[in-house]
């Protein structure tokens, strides 16, 4: 319970700064606690947890018991991305397990408004995720209510995929919509992001960066991999402040 409270306090101090969220989908699950410790030393802001059911996406990963285990070894906010059908059935379980953020796919839930409000009423941040081929218009009615939008820059289901270039324009358009409507939603981007294209993604308007292979494929150097991404993000933030 103390760790959970600390993670919420940390989250409140983050404001709208750029956040780096290592995705454990690419981590070594045999040494998960050690992997998390490495990214924490590098300055990770959030831990991204991909949940897949083998139906909404062609892969199966983990469930609430693993989230509960993660909660015991980290104070970082747990950003739980539900790539599952009927996500509303499992919201309470993931929040009890320790999830701080929960994102559900617009394509998977016909009652987005109800589910988003339920997540928020349970004390967690609520987000909506959209696949690469899903238009931003799918967010039109729900955008004012969400805490963040997760733009998938690869087709979900597997790690290590190449960033889809058209995602940059999608991020830019979403940033313009958020700014013009005065919404509070942050923009999170997930898929194929690393040092080679992070600057482009940030310039487009992203605020939360999910990175898996770019961090955990470096093994013991995962700490330095996070630091490298943080350095790029911090340099970008300083440029924006002085512009």
Image: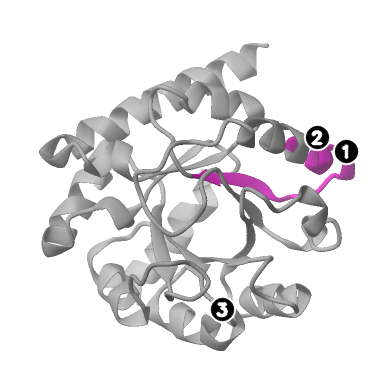
Residue at x 18% of width, y 62% of height: 29
**In screen coordinates, is 101 left or right of 145?**
left
Q: Where residue 112 is drawn, which disc sits there?
A: none
Indicate the quadrant containing the N terminus: top left, top right, bottom left or bottom right: bottom left
Q: Secondary structure at mark 1?
A: helix
* Residue 89 is inside the magenta segment: no
| Residues marked 2 and 3 touching at CB (< 8 Å) | no
How far apart marks 3 and 1 lie (CA) works out to 32 Å
Residue 200 coordinates in the image, percent (x, y): 55, 23
Q: Dot 3, how many residues are within 10 Å of its Cα: few (below 14), some (14-19), or many (20+)?
A: some
Looking at the image, is mark 2 or mark 3 earlier in the sequence? 3
Q: Nearer the viewer, residue 195 or 45?
A: 195
Cα separation, mark 2 vs mark 3, equals 30 Å
Report the front residue among 60 and 49. Answer: 60
Residue at the disc numbered 2: 176
The magenta segment is 175-190
Check residue 180 in the rendering and tell me which mark sits there, or answer none. 1
Q: Nearer the viewer, residue 177 or 38?
A: 177
Cβ–Cβ below 8 Å for labels 2 and 1? Answer: yes
Q: Residue at x 18, y 36 (%)?
A: 218
Tell me which numbered mark, 3 or 1, is placed earlier along the sequence: 3
Q: Where residue 169 appears, x then y in whole percent?
A: 70, 31
Q: Which mark is residue 85?
A: 3
Please tell me which residue is depicted at 37% across the width and 80% down the height of the picture: 64
């Amino acid at each position: 319970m103390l760790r959970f409270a600390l993670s919420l306090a940390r989250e409140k101090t983050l404001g709208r700064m750029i956040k780096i969220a290592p995705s454990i989908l690419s981590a070594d699950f045999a040494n998960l606690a050690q992997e998390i410790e490495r990214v924490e030393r590098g300055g990770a802001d959030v831990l991204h947890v991909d949940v897949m059911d083998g139906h909404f996406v062609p892969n199966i990963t983990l469930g609430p018991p693993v989230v509960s285990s993660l909660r015991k070894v980290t104070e970082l906010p747990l950003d739980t991305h539900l790539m599952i059908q009927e996500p509303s059935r499992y919201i309470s379980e993931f929040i009890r397990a320790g999830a701080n953020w929960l994102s559900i796919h617009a394509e998977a839930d016909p009652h987005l408004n109800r589910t988003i409000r339920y997540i928020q009423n349970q004390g967690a941040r609520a987000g909506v995720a959209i696949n690469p081929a899903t238009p931003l218009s799918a967010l039109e009615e729900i955008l004012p209510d969400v805490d963040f939008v997760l733009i998938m820059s690869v087709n979900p289901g597997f790690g290590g995929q190449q960033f889809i270039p058209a995602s940059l324009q999608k991020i830019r358009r979403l940033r313009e919509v958020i700014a013009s409507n005065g919404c509070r939603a942050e923009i999170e981007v997930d898929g194929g992001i690393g040092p080679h294209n992070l600057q482009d993604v940030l310039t487009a308007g992203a605020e939360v960066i999910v990175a898996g292979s770019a961090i955990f494929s470096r093994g013991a150097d995962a700490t330095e991999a996070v630091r490298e991404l943080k350095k790029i993000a911090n340099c970008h933030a300083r440029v924006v402040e002085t512009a």
